[in-house]
Amino acid sequence: MAQARVPIQTDPDPPVSWVALIGFMGTGKSRIGWELSRILRLTFIDTDKVIERITCLTIPEILELYGEATFRDYETEVVRRSLRLDRAVISTGGGTVVRPENRALLAGRGPVVRLNAAAETIYKRTRRHKRPLLEVGDPTERIRDLLRERESFYQEAASFTVESDDRDASDVVADVVDGLRRWAAEHPNHEAVKGIGQA
């Protein structure tokens, strides 16, 4: 097994001032997003947590009381508001990319990093939490079906993908930072790149 990289404390030369994380539930967006925000000295925003604070309801409660369409409306509004932020890492919900509007909004603001993991890993990470989409006879097969359904959506929105399967969080974060550096070098005049180092 490869030795884990030494965790980066902070990045003295952060490559971007705004980044969004997408990916299926359980791929590590919240954990990696928080670590990434600390390293890049950016504010961490979890869109699901924002929705829960605004509505005073949990995501399962919103889905049960009002249905998925209403939840997706909340989600799109939070995504729109997140685009106005600067110096932020945005962790999105697993189904955010289902709506074409959300994919276009995130990709337009960019960069967008997709975190990916196998269905078995996702189930292990999510089985202790109430996930309405996975309350079926075979949750792992349901995850596989949803991953297949959403694959093209993730690919359309993502600037690049980082695998999070069976990996130390510091390794995943390091790969994300490396990817952001490459992305910034390819987009030197992008809004998320200009102005770096002024904070």
Image: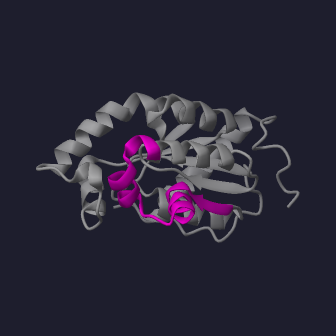
Return the residue nearer the eye: 20 or 66.
66
Membership of 61 in magenta stretch: yes
Residue that lies at the very extreme toward the front in this rendered image: 65
Q: Is residue 50 visible?
A: yes
- Residue positioned 29% across, 47% down in the render: 118
Membership of 145 in magenta stretch: no
Q: Kindly indicate the quadrant of the structure image that contains residue 61.
A: bottom left
- Residue positioned 47% across, 43% down in the render: 72
Residue 25 lies, with reference to residue 97, above or below; the image says below
From the top left corner, tell me how far across and down residue 53 is, in percent: 55, 65
* Quadrant for the N terminus in the image: bottom left
Is residue 8 rendered to the left or right of residue 123? right
Q: Is the stretch drawn in magenta largely helix, strand or loop?
A: helix
Residue 177 lies, with reference to residue 188, above or below; the image says below
From the top left corner, tell me how far across and down residue 173 is, in percent: 54, 58
Q: Is residue 25 visible?
A: no
Write the start and end of the magenta stretch as one range.
43-70
* Quadrant for the C terminus in the image: bottom right
Q: How many marks?
A: 0
- Residue positioned 64% across, 48% down in the render: 19
